[in-house]
Image: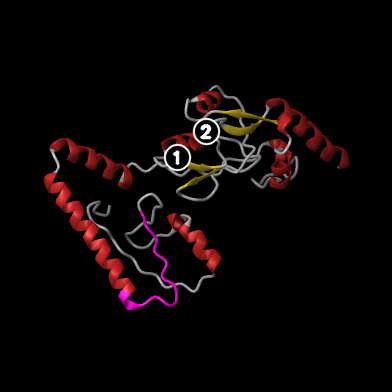
Amino acid sequence: MPDPDKARVRVYATHSTHKTLTALRQGSMIHVHDQDFEHNARNTVLFMIPIGMSRGTIAHLVNVLTEIARDLDDKRDRWSKVELKAYDAQVRSLTQELPPLPNFSCFHPAFLTSSDSTTPEGDLRRAFYRAYDDKACDFIKLEDGSLLNAIEAEQEVVSAAFITPYPPGFPVLVPGQVITREIVQFLMALDEKEIHGYEPAFGLRVFTAEDLRQEDERTNGQRITKS
């Protein structure tokens, strides 16, 4: 495991389009590995160097990073044991106690592409537009444990929105996807609570059980009739 007291630098050349660079900036580098270095959006800073930047600009960046490191060393020398303990806990949280990224769960049967599908593909478009009907949706809180309690009680909870935490900057839930314990635990473990698609005042937007039943009966029934 890399030394948490060191800032490691990797330089990559890219001929990517601006869209690819934007994706990298938003945290996609969490999937990039090399021999002994793993990029993680929680403890990685991405600097994009476009055409037109001079050697002096790069030198200035290096100097600033050096000043930050020296300033941190000076603070560590002055900190008490309590402050050092709190600092070490924060470093450990960023380098070792990383919340595990959840795998994609599955689409609810009401939003599968076919009733006998053996693949995880779903009808995302239909789920997305179905969520526009307020009567089809409800809200459930994340912070107070209501969502986790519902799942542990084996209730079927299905997302009605794109849920995108930053970092890592890509959706961990899409409309029509079944919410699992691992996904909820990941969201609750995030130290940065910037979660696009989630409204803390209301909660997570989900489909109601009755609407899922009706949608499942309507869509799967239609497919059976057509066959």
Looking at the magenta stretch, what is its main secondary structure? loop
- Front one among 87 and 181: 87
Q: CA distance from mark 1 to mark 2?
A: 10 Å
Residue 132 falls inside the magenta stretch:
no
Residue 184 vertical placement versus 43 (above, below): above
Secondary structure state at the residue bearing disc 1: loop
Q: Residue at x 79, y 31 (%)?
A: 217
Mark 1–mark 2 CB contact (< 8 Å): yes
Indicate the position of residue 194 as horizontal and vertical percent values.
47, 43
Return the disc, 1 or 2, that comes first in the chain's sequence.
Answer: 1
Residue range (magenta) = 44-56
- Front one among 8 and 217: 8
Is residue 112 visible in the rendered structure shown here?
no
Q: Residue at x 46, y 59 (%)?
A: 25
Instruction: Judge left or right: residue 142 versus residue 219.
Output: left
Secondary structure state at the residue bearing disc 2: loop
Snapshot colouring: secondary structure
Q: Residues within 10 Å of mark 1 (few under 14, many from 20)?
A: some
Q: Residue under circle 2?
A: 200
The amino acid on which the numbered mark 1 sits, given as a three-letter code, is Lys
Q: Residue 7: name its quadrant.
A: bottom left
Is residue 120 visible in the rendered structure shown here?
yes
The amino acid on which the numbered mark 2 sits, given as a three-letter code, is Pro
Indicate the position of residue 76 as horizontal and vertical percent values.
16, 47
Residue 107 vertical placement versus 21 (above, below): above
Residue 186 vertical placement versus 214 (above, below): below
- Marking on residue 193: 1
The C terminus lies in which quarter of the figure? top right
